[in-house]
Amino acid sequence: MYLLHGKLTAKAGHRDELANILIAWSKQGASGCRLYAIGKAENEPEAVYVTEIWDSKEDHDNSLKLESVRAAIAEAMPIIGEQPQKGQELEILGGLGV
């Protein structure tokens, strides 16, 4: 499996809008996606955290070619305040649901 954890920073006042775009996309799903969780930290008013678990890195990479993903990215880009950075790839050791 493939675990990716990252942070997106919205322009001031747009965190909830960015989170809602990501949540809306997550309801569509993608082949091989087991978890797509969106979170926030109260001490970071513009940050949106995304934790993803995929069957494989290939499934994740293939999802970036989907029209629904490209549309969500296009919708989100105007409200992203900082250049998105590649998320942290982590090795799954175990846990509930994996």
Image (cartoon, grey):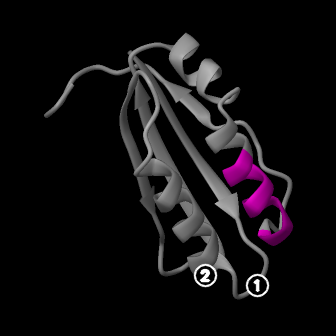
Residue 45 badge: 2
Where's residue 95, x and y in %?
18, 30
Q: Is residue 64 above or below residue 15?
A: above
Q: Is residue 22 above or below residue 60?
A: below
Residue at 62%, 19% in the rendered image:
62
Q: Label 2 crowding class (10 Å Cα cut-off): few <14, some 14-19, many 20+?
A: some
Identify residue type, mark 1.
Ala
Residue 81 badge: none
Instruction: Assign the magenta stretch its main secondary structure.
Output: helix
Which residue is most to the front?
Answer: 67
Residue at 59%, 34% in the rendered image:
88
- Report whether residue 53 is seen: yes
Left-right relation of 2 to 95: right
Where's residue 73, x and y in %?
73, 50
Left-right relation of 33 to 50: left
- Report whether residue 44 is seen: no
Left-right relation of 78 to 26: right
Indicate the quadrant containing the C terminus: top left, top right, bottom left or bottom right: top left
- Determine which residue is flagged by label 1: 12
Where's residue 47, x and y in %?
62, 68
Identify residue type, mark 2.
Pro
Q: Label 1 crowding class (10 Å Cα cut-off): few <14, some 14-19, many 20+?
A: few
